[in-house]
Amino acid sequence: MSASKWKQYTEYRVIQHAGIDKIPNHWVSKRMRYVFRERGEVSEDGTEELLSVSKYTGVRIRSTTTDREARATSLVGYKKCEPNDIVSNIMLAWDSALGVAFDSGIVSSAYEVYVPQQEIDPHFLDLLLRTPEYRVAFTIVSKGIVPSRWRMYTESFNDMQMILPSLREQKQIGKFVHQIDENISNNIQNLTTQISLLEEKRSTLIKQAVTKGLNLDISMKDSGIEWLGLVPSHWNLKRMRFLCDITTGGGNTEDAVEEGDYPFFVRSPHVKRISTYSFDGEAVLTSGDGAGVGKIYHHYIGKLDFHQRVYLFSNFKGISGRLFYHYLKENLETVVLSLSAKSTVDSIRLPMLQNFTIAFGSKEEQLEILNQLERVNDLTSALVDKIRTYIQLLKEYRTALISAAITGKIDVRGQA
């Protein structure tokens, strides 16, 4: 989709507004004080629907956007707002935490509510206030020394410029933006699905390679284990206790140091840092309890430290540590879940690991498998990276195109 499809306006009028230097001649520009008034009504009993303001969703009924308790102890004195009002979070307007309300309700007294004094298409208005240009403008007029203390008060809001095409053109722009957003969002969703399919295919190939080998035409034998099924007849089947040492760490999450010299493995996919180490060598690590059970795995060679509820596997015998890592990553969660009636497991006990069965071939075959896994990983990662880059470009293009339409840089009349 090329931007050249939409023509540029040829006649502009210069205005003084942050991020917007000119608008089409037939558009108007007014200070906010002449377009809106501040709403002063407050709730007398606090029974109205509570609304919230987010940079991501705009103004919405709070109960539809969060699982948290929707009401404070008392909402008496909260500010009323009606459909088409602007609601602005004084402290975060500079970060796009404002927008148009599409429902009646009440909002925190830390918000400002403004009522349009003329007919304005609410969808156009909501889009306009959340463009990058207006975000810049809100940032400039906010008062405070640091972002955490920036505030945009009514006086500053009133002095800003409001740009407005005719009501008919507002509706045309809104329709155009909806079509653009829908088309690009559908493309992004399709690309995101492709990423999921690629990663699913990678996982399937890795699991097949580490449990069945690379040659599926060779003689197979029954492993005697339901979840494992058939394995190459010449492969070994051994419990984990005979293949490696298993231990847990001695650290707590609070021991992490931001600029520490060594990696510190905790019950999270994100590795922290620490100033001391308790292990030096090749290790595979996994979370022993919490939300990461069966989902978090690391393979590392070198000095490290680890949490007291993280399992570390080392001193591998007859099996490559790297292959051990892939085998564990693809199979352990299935086994753990099969031993529990719950959909999630709170912790992994040591006997469960000690008795976990691993199937593997010779060192030469392990090396072949690892080389193949590296190729699969490299190819998949390269494809996924390209798709993610394209998704990011689509998002940037969508933002730029929508902003151009909303601020009058391109003429979409007759396109929507």
Image (tube, rainbow, N blue to C red):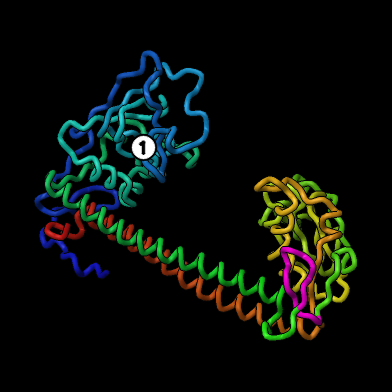
- Image location of residue 360, percent across then percent down: 79, 76
> At 30% across and 61% down in the image, what residue appears?
183
Mark 1, residue position = 59
Q: Nearer the viewer, residue 39 or 382?
A: 382
Q: Is residue 298 visible?
A: no
Estimate the x, y position of residue 220 in percent, counting from the top left: 74, 80
Q: Is residue 317 magenta?
A: no
Question: Of the residues shown, which amino acid type is indicated by label 1?
Answer: Val
**Is 207 on the left or on the right of 123, as rendered?**
right
Span colored in magenta:
221-234
Q: Residues within 10 Å of mark 1 (few under 14, many from 20)?
A: many
Front-most of residues 222 and 24? 222
> Residue 4, how many percent across, how many down?
21, 70
Image quarter of residue 332: bottom right
Q: Is residue 339 above or below residue 366?
A: above
Residue at 56% from the left image edge and 71% from the top image edge: 201
